[in-house]
Image (cartoon, coloured by chain):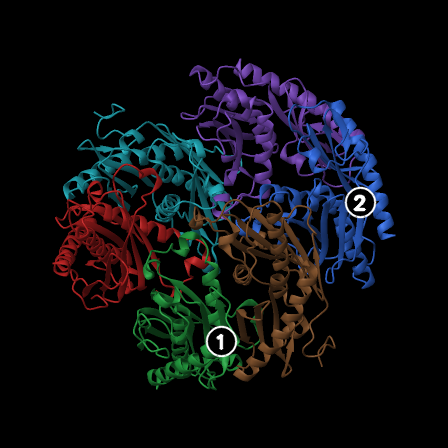
Chain colours: A cyan, B purple, C blue, D red, E brown, F green
Amino acid sequence: MRPSKRDAQDIRPVSLERGVSKYAEGSCLIRCGDTHVLCTASIAERVPPWMRGLGRGWVTAEYGMLPRATSDRTRREATAGRQSGRTLEIQRLIGRSLRAAIDLDKLGEVQITVDCDVLQADGGTRTASITGAWVALHDCVQWMKARNMVTQDPIKDHVAAISCGLYRDMAVCDLDYAEDSEAQADANFVMTGKGELIEVQGTAEGAPFSEAAFIELLSLARGGISRLVDLQKTAVG
Amino acid sequence: MRPSKRDAQDIRPVSLERGVSKYAEGSCLIRCGDTHVLCTASIAERVPPWMRGLGRGWVTAEYGMLPRATSDRTRREATAGRQSGRTLEIQRLIGRSLRAAIDLDKLGEVQITVDCDVLQADGGTRTASITGAWVALHDCVQWMKARNMVTQDPIKDHVAAISCGLYRDMAVCDLDYAEDSEAQADANFVMTGKGELIEVQGTAEGAPFSEAAFIELLSLARGGISRLVDLQKTAVG
Amino acid sequence: MRPSKRDAQDIRPVSLERGVSKYAEGSCLIRCGDTHVLCTASIAERVPPWMRGLGRGWVTAEYGMLPRATSDRTRREATAGRQSGRTLEIQRLIGRSLRAAIDLDKLGEVQITVDCDVLQADGGTRTASITGAWVALHDCVQWMKARNMVTQDPIKDHVAAISCGLYRDMAVCDLDYAEDSEAQADANFVMTGKGELIEVQGTAEGAPFSEAAFIELLSLARGGISRLVDLQKTAVG
Amino acid sequence: MRPSKRDAQDIRPVSLERGVSKYAEGSCLIRCGDTHVLCTASIAERVPPWMRGLGRGWVTAEYGMLPRATSDRTRREATAGRQSGRTLEIQRLIGRSLRAAIDLDKLGEVQITVDCDVLQADGGTRTASITGAWVALHDCVQWMKARNMVTQDPIKDHVAAISCGLYRDMAVCDLDYAEDSEAQADANFVMTGKGELIEVQGTAEGAPFSEAAFIELLSLARGGISRLVDLQKTAVG
Amino acid sequence: MRPSKRDAQDIRPVSLERGVSKYAEGSCLIRCGDTHVLCTASIAERVPPWMRGLGRGWVTAEYGMLPRATSDRTRREATAGRQSGRTLEIQRLIGRSLRAAIDLDKLGEVQITVDCDVLQADGGTRTASITGAWVALHDCVQWMKARNMVTQDPIKDHVAAISCGLYRDMAVCDLDYAEDSEAQADANFVMTGKGELIEVQGTAEGAPFSEAAFIELLSLARGGISRLVDLQKTAVG
Amino acid sequence: MRPSKRDAQDIRPVSLERGVSKYAEGSCLIRCGDTHVLCTASIAERVPPWMRGLGRGWVTAEYGMLPRATSDRTRREATAGRQSGRTLEIQRLIGRSLRAAIDLDKLGEVQITVDCDVLQADGGTRTASITGAWVALHDCVQWMKARNMVTQDPIKDHVAAISCGLYRDMAVCDLDYAEDSEAQADANFVMTGKGELIEVQGTAEGAPFSEAAFIELLSLARGGISRLVDLQKTAVG
């Protein structure tokens, strides 16, 4: 029995609220249960130095957590003077995932930065960030289209993500914090709207896990991500 | 004529939403027009080293802005590796203001950290932070009272803040960004519920200003803060 | 009775020694009692990036304290790896104050950096820095005039500063450290030679203070600054 | 055809040279083709603060590359002032992988730090680090056993790692740099001697990949890791 | 002919002004021509961690330059976020030199920090720092003696320093900046009052130099340091 | 009697292994007894900003130690966030020494960076770095010659270095760690192939030392460096 009473394949209630920022070219507040992430997409005319003059665009991501997004207050990274390894790892993952959704050649020589700031954390902040960031990125591209900044649609497909894990010897979908903190294994999956894989990250927390267990997690993820993509379609439709 | 059509003494619509955080001991989302600040109060058992063993508490504040809280995206301070001078100045101001509201001797040897994170900025973020932070601090103290962590009420009075300025030769109350960016003078006032001064910070932006003009700003601030204190009373009442 | 036996409106003995640096385009060693600040003004051909090509100049300030300028040795900021919030706040204040003294359009596209380094601290280091920095800035502009680098005098007026406070329920002018450390309220005032306000920063240290008390501090400051401006006139005359 | 003429399932020539450090309690220089990593295991009496007094040990890893380990010189991280996101991600991966190999309760309250320093890089530095680090860790534990610092063997199993990828539409094992730089997908696998999974990290570089392709990579990895574990057994036998 | 018209063996006019700091336990403003260094000695009860409980003292030094101590303004190290390699090298040299002057066992478990801050630089700042720092250290020890903090005199001997160099093929003593900037070789010597060596640092700037030339520099240094020690004796006598 | 049984003038067994890096334009692994340093020379088209457009080259050096190069594990400088004063001092010394070996005008506008990374340390790492770095630099220049990047040979002479010291009242050559850690005085000498001096750095560790003792160290160094230069000639011959 899961702490939230959900069945093994159930994801938490999800809402995708678009246009929440007065300034950003695209924005989305995603709520997956008690995990809330504010995603904003910002356009800049400058691409990174190694891309200048190539006529291609770039998409990157940054991730942060408010200090009291967590059960115990976490030290603010701006006062610590550096982003933690965990933060850097997550924002690299979000960036790679978003770039798989977009044809950078069609974007023109601009950079889109998607900021994912966790207002409240209850497990799955990195996967919620990806799912919400895609909506912000989509709306940013719409904003560009409305201004004739792009001629062909650079969005190739949906991208969404979910974590699955082994909790008390059972494979379950969309771990919340109560489950995540005692999971035996934990895996994050990022997929396209067509169900192909972009990123897979699985970690044994206690004992190592079998290939069969991993395949089961992958199967649960496919179902959860399919539901998230449907929600994205409804949101931007 | 103000860009927002407000009269000189009018403040923007203000809402104070309590209990917005699942985890924080006290929290408040303050909205002053399009300026939105999430304030959370967190208790820790540890006071700063120089206060250990004295039996007194401490209240401190931290301030941050989401990168796209502003019209143009601002660099994330965690990636810059340090808080800017502006940020440090603001969080020192918030901390001093809150400590004026509370009897540290009655708090017991705990530290309360109030985080003020600007989700959206349209002028007056530091004063909105103070007004909202007081509510979060109040609720944190209520939380302590409910657990018998304090025996006497450490809250001495309300604390609220507002900025006033000279805009096109007219003294106006509660500057928004459109006014702030071309104000001739700008002053922030922090006052108690009884109308006494805690902090005064006035700056000439272009030409220096006269004592008479300054007194006029102070008078407008008194009115605005009085209304904010009424809203705080309603919110926590 | 003040520890220094001064009357309420008395400032400390002040000396302004010009030309103390072999290299700087303008320099002044200001002594306000036991507070000694070495101010040097340096010209650079480069303005900050956001001002390039506009034909306007820029004036900025930096502030520092020698480690043993204080009663107890303070950690050197260069070893701490960053300037403290207090330092950043002070150097921003000095910079804003000096820019109020000068017409940047008439300066031409150069940057003047005024360094204020506290050799010995006995209260009022930021206000002494402003008063001394104005002299260094003035002499730097004279240096430019002598080389025909400016055609019209960019200096608009004198700028000087003083702190006043409530000490044992009495409003007093020009706090020294013995007073400052137990003042009930402390306010810094920056004014022009004509007596107009550039900056006002008042802080309640213990109990909040009344508007009447604040007006009294402002009045004392006006007297003190008037005497400092006279000393500046004598020094540069 | 692979650039190295290897068959799809072939790993590069591997050597594991033990005892290469005069000082370290365990050490191994691993060479996987032209990728050379020096791994040293160091014992310290201090565990991290959150583990003190629990009687359990800790194993952690650090990773670095000499500046000219790469084709173009890379900036030294010590001069950059921080470890890159890539470095932090890799050393976190190595640490997690090693902890899966060891029973921390049986280790006693000591910390073992395994440093993996890449002397020369030709692809697969993180997986080579894990395979070599296990040998250094093993020898460090032997060193402890010889001194009666542990009573029961804390080593639970072998741990080794390899990267596989899709190169010109073919699944291949043990990517070298020439393959890695144009791979369509790239996955790192960490497994135990029994063939169970510890970590899985797959990334689409260009187009997303199918589940079937991923399963094929996993199968290749199983073969490669099996060979690496045999080499570890020979080395420490 | 030297730019300053001095003979080869002549040092610049030197003054040693004691007691220049209101707060420091020992202080000295040394002027060697236009090189001016403010040296303060500060006592702390805490020794570095590796020396605690041993009953021995420690002497350390820090070095800094005001930004406009030099002909062109130098960036403030506190804003750069780190001390330069040159600064670290110099303060390590000063510390080692001072520790050669003192019997740390007789000092008791205290740390003396000598800050050497260059107010104006015209060559030879590191050697002037050492000569002046010895006076500050001496007076600090006198201060301790007057309070019975030491029972035996920990000062073993004088320590002073000078730079010599090859300027236009001539060996000269006490280089000023005009000479230093075009010297063929440059050597700093630190000696005791008895004329024994503590530190020797010689560097070829252009062509390498012969042993004979080096011996000649050493001989000049002996003469110069002897005069500096006489001046120290007069100052503290 | 020296711990290594060597006679006073004996250096340790030295090997110079060239071409150890697959990528670097020049490389050398130097082993002096148990001190092992990997030296790589890397060419870059960019010279430092202050040298651009002058047509001259630049040679610089960086130095690092693997964390477990030493008897006790040393903290990795990349995690500490800065290079230590010792590291900066050493790499400045190596850079100056190498620049004395080369005619920068004949090098053309390129920068050569020589990285010296200590794999294992048993005393004398800075002097071994210089001796090995010269070989890497030499081979890098040969690489340039083979590609007609230089028209005249920029190498002026050999450069090698050794440390000598007073150990148990005896002057000895090429200190190892056992001697270095209890030496009364320690001096590093850098010389050309012709026996002229480039750098001299002598330090009294306990009591100051006499000029006669220093001359004796210099004489021993001359012999040791002569042997090192012979080994360099054999290596590159």
Residue receiving disc 1:
F214
Q: In this rendering, would F158 be left or right of D222?
A: right
Q: Which one is in front in this view, the residue at disc 2 or the one at disc 1?
A: 1
Q: Are marks 2 and 1 on the same chain?
A: no
Residue, x 16% and y 62% (percent of image)?
A: D10
- Please state which of residues A221 and C153 is positioned toward the viewer in this rendering: C153
Residue F60 visible to an observer of this rendering: no
Position of residue A91 measured from the top left corner of the image (x, y, whole percent): 39, 45
Residue, x 35% and y 77% (percent of image)?
A: F11
Residue, x 78% and y 43% (percent of image)?
A: C160
Q: Quadrant of residue C127?
A: top right
Numbered badge on residue C14: 2
Position of residue E120 measured from the top left corner of the image (x, y, whole percent): 69, 61
The correct choice, above or below, for B125 with respect to E158 in the image is above
Distance from Cα at disc 2 to Cα at disc 1: 54 Å
Q: Residues within 10 Å of mark 1 (few under 14, many from 20)?
A: many
